[in-house]
Image (cartoon, helix red, strand yellow):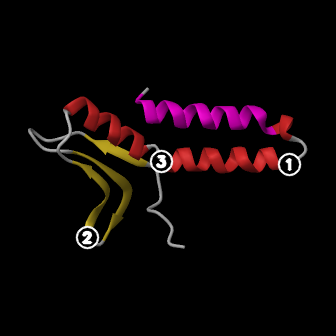
Amino acid sequence: MTTPTPGPWQVLPPLGEGDYSVHSERVTAYGNCYVAVIPNCPHAEAEANARLIAAAPELLKAVQIAYACLRRADTERDENRVVNILLSAIAKAEGE
């Protein structure tokens, strides 16, 4: 399976009448690594979509950690860590 572009990803606001975009901090030989461009949406909706896409790496990591903790018998030990990671990922997706 091919792996996605490593995070973190960030939202770039539009320049003038342009589109919102999401890019990785990773720079390739071709320049910045753009993950997504959100065209043809109302401004607020495009911004919300871009935030959700930018949060994808953190959301995936949070779900993977939560799943691993739930599979172990001693989940209480990691409960605060899981909760903090989940809350951070949710906040990024919601633009907080």
The numbered dot on residue 54 is none
Q: Residue 47: name its quadrant.
A: top left
At 79% across and 39% down in the image, what residue appears? 78
Q: Label 3: which residue?
A: 56
At 47% across and 53% down in the image, what residue appears? 7
Image quarter (top left, top right, bottom left or bottom right) of the C terminus: top left
Task: Indicate the secondary structure of the residue bearing disc 2.
Answer: loop
Residue with the most extreme right position = 73
Point out the tag, 3 or 1, that comes first from the N-terminus. 3
Residue 73 lies, in percent from the top left, at 90, 45
Q: Amino acid at mark 1?
A: Arg
Front residue of 9/56: it is 56
Q: Which residues are magenta?
A: 78-95
Whether tag 3 and tag 1 are in contact, CB under 8 A, the answer is no
The numbered dot on residue 30 is 2
Whether tag 3 and tag 2 are in contact, CB under 8 A, the answer is no
Q: Amino acid at mark 2?
A: Tyr
Q: Label 1: which residue?
A: 72
Residue 10 located within the stretch drawn in magenta? no
Residue 83 lies, in percent from the top left, at 68, 32
Question: Label 3 to label 1, Cα distance in Å?
Answer: 25 Å
Question: Label 2 to label 1, Cα distance in Å?
Answer: 43 Å
Point out the tag, 2 or 1, that comes first from the N-terminus. 2
At 55% across and 33% down in the image, what residue appears? 88
Residue 94 located within the stretch drawn in magenta? yes
Image quarter (top left, top right, bottom left or bottom right) of the N terminus: bottom right
Residue 52 lies, in percent from the top left, at 41, 40
Question: Label 3 to label 2, Cα distance in Å?
Answer: 23 Å
Most frequent secondary structure within the magenta stretch: helix
Q: Is residue 23 above or below residue 55?
A: below
